[in-house]
Amino acid sequence: MLVSDTESEPLSDEADEAEQPSVPDPARAQQRLDDLLADLRHEFPKFRIVRKDSSRLQRTLHYAMVIATFGRVRDYLDEYYNTVGATIYVTSEWPDKDPDDCYVLLRHEREHMRQFRRYTSVGMMLLYWLAPVPFGLAYFRARFEKAGYEQTVRASAEVYGLDYVKDASFREFVVEQFTTVNYGWMWPFRNGMEAWYDQIVDDIEQSGAYALEAEVGPLEEFSIEVPEIHL
Ligand SMILES: [Zn+2]
């Protein structure tokens, strides 16, 4: 089921204009985010950002998530971002987030918006949640999230530099999304996921597509999202 346009009030697309002391050049970070938002609006005319806690459906999904994960995921509304069609649902923290953090998140979510466009909502429902099984070996969910998290890694390197994505804790964070309860144990093959991650980082390093200056990112504040649960 898709969210109706009347269910939630869209938020402003503009990120917080306040000073971001953790970022050396906040103006450049804001410009990078604004450019991406413009690209998204151009590629997806219906693109919008909506706060999850303003959506009745999202609150319902919160309870579905609690049930589906046997009570192990209880922070759905507060911690997770997700995408339905061209709508990205965000947490209440969104307006105060660092522009660089928003940029990395949107790079990930753009992949899901493209997947929705390619496979349609019905296709995404079937493939993302059911094919071939909902938990344990969710091949298509893993495939879709690989596309998303590859962009998470690439965008992080562009913003925070190569050392950031080479950091063992960040690598572990990404790999764990596939191997743990976070996405329903969608692809619990740690060695394969680590090799996949390392290949992306090798490619980033060889291509030089990373920030040269040592911009220090908030390593403890990795952003987590899951795309939509369809009911
Ligand atoms: Zn994702």
Image (spheres, rainbow, N blue to C red):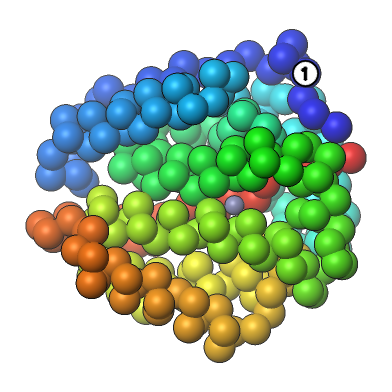
Q: Which residue is painted at 68% across and 79% down in the image?
A: 188
* Percent position of residue 162, x then y: 23, 67
Q: Is residue 92 left or right of residue 202?
A: right
* Percent position of residue 215, x then y: 17, 55
Judging depth in this view, the residue of 42 and 129 nearest the camera is 42
Badge 1 residue CB within 8 Å of ligand 1: no
Q: Which residue is painted at 22% across and 59% down in the image?
A: 210
* Residue under pointer 1: 4
Judging depth in this view, the residue of 222 and 197 nearest the camera is 197
Q: Quadrant of residue 218?
A: bottom left
* Percent position of residue 185, x then y: 73, 71
**Which residue occupies the extreme top position in the image?**
6
Q: Quadrant of the N terminus?
A: top right
Q: Is residue 210 left or right of residue 155?
A: left
Judging depth in this view, the residue of 83 and 46 nearest the camera is 46
**Which residue occupies the extreme bottom position in the image?**
191
Q: Is residue 160 left or right of residue 184?
A: left
Label 1 SS: loop
Q: Is residue 54 above or below residue 189?
A: above
Q: Which residue is painted at 23% across and 72% down in the image?
A: 206
Q: Quadrant of the C terminus?
A: top right
Q: Number of marks in the image?
A: 1
Which amino acid, by three-letter code, is at mark 1? Ser
Q: Quadrant of residue 171?
A: bottom left
Judging depth in this view, the residue of 136 and 113 nearest the camera is 113
Q: Which residue is painted at 26% across and 51% down in the image?
A: 159
Can residue 178 be seen here? The reply is yes
Q: Is residue 46 left or right of residue 156?
A: right
